[in-house]
Amino acid sequence: METTEAARVEGSDRFAAAARLADRFLENIESVVHGKREEVKLVLAALVCGGHVLFEDVPGTAKTVLARAIAQSIDGATPSRIQCTPDLQPTDVTGLSIFNQKERDFEFRPGPIFANVVLVDEINRAMPKTQSALLEAMAEQQVTVDGETRVLPDPFLLFATENPIEYEGTFPLPEAQLDRFFLKTALGYPDAADERRILAEQRTGHPLRLLEPVLTVEEVQQLRRAAQDVYVDDLIQSWIVDLVRVTRDHELVSIGASVRGSLALERAARGWALLNDRAFVVPEDVERLFLPVLLHRIMFRPAFLAEARREGWPAASARFKESCLAAAPKPEASTEGAVVPLSS
């Protein structure tokens, strides 16, 4: 009994320390990205779960600022930016081997993918062969050039953006690559008060220049271990599986979410709970993450797409979510308010 109690106390202390790190991380980023707490938490949930994020958003909504803020908040982390164009080649992303005349041998020059936080701007403007160069990096955190596999830095977080208002000269992302993104979201425009604050702050320069790191790479790994230890009840795990399976049989769906969707939804719920200072997942976490984690993994039938064009994508998505929740109701017994310690 004493050993069990000691393990529970140790687990609780470990979670409390991780929760403080997460709060410090979030507050530091919010000092330069204003009024987007929920959206920033989504991105950080992907980071602590080892996932990648796809933004479908208009230009000028602080996507680059967010990527740089995350990198600058981690001591020793490096940011990188890849601007996609139709003539961008795979080696422009991964790097290539160049002959060194002095050494009389080939040496590898790493590309911009070799960074901790990578922003791939307008990914759908790159040709399919260049898009595919990102697949191995996203799925396995490595790239293979000239037959040699090279491991990418850890942590590794990739942001990709799509412009939703201009599709001329773009190459739609293949379904396999969409499924590699942990979640899809948007930052959107700030409200009037936050926009006035941005104007005042940037009168003499960007606040990013003053942003200091608040945690180390080792502490990011600590956050990831804590997220893995967040408690998910068997009822909630079963419900997650039921929800994902509903998307496969839904009348409006051509191809539903894969098992990768089930894994991502469960992992995201753990990360979201940690960022909300909880050591356990509640059904509301799964509800909140349903659309960001699953929607981009689903191929809809033309009838749904026609409805979405008429009433707007947000309204159609919300209606689809409600129909899935009705087909797979959430567990009645909620763990909210319970004290569930982390496993040792």
Image (cartoon, grey):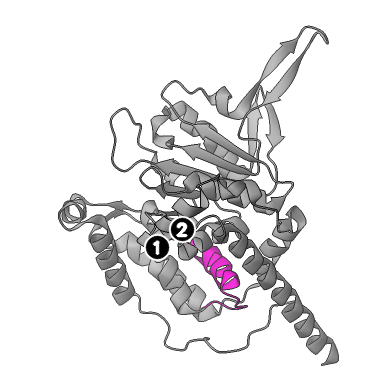
Q: Within the magenta stretch, is there residue 12?
A: no
Stretch of the chain drawn in magenta: 262-281
Query: Where is 225 relative to 108, above or below?
Result: below
On-image quarter of the C terminus: bottom right
Instruction: Residue 117: give x, y in percent of width and height.
Output: 61, 44
Q: Quadrant of residue 244?
A: bottom left
Compare residues 182 and 215 and report the one nearer the observer.
215
Q: Residue under circle 1?
A: 193
Relative to 142, 5 lies left or right? right
Compare residues 45 and 177 and report the one nearer the observer.
45
Instruction: Residue 332: give x, y in percent of width and height.
Output: 42, 87
Q: Quadrant of residue 242?
A: bottom left
Relative to 136, 250 lies left or right? left
Q: Secondary structure at mark 2?
A: helix
Residue shown at 48% from the left, 87% from the top: 334
Instruction: Residue 104: give x, y in percent of width and height.
Output: 81, 8
Q: Within the magenta stretch, is there residue 267?
A: yes
In the drawing, what numbered circle is on residue 197? 2
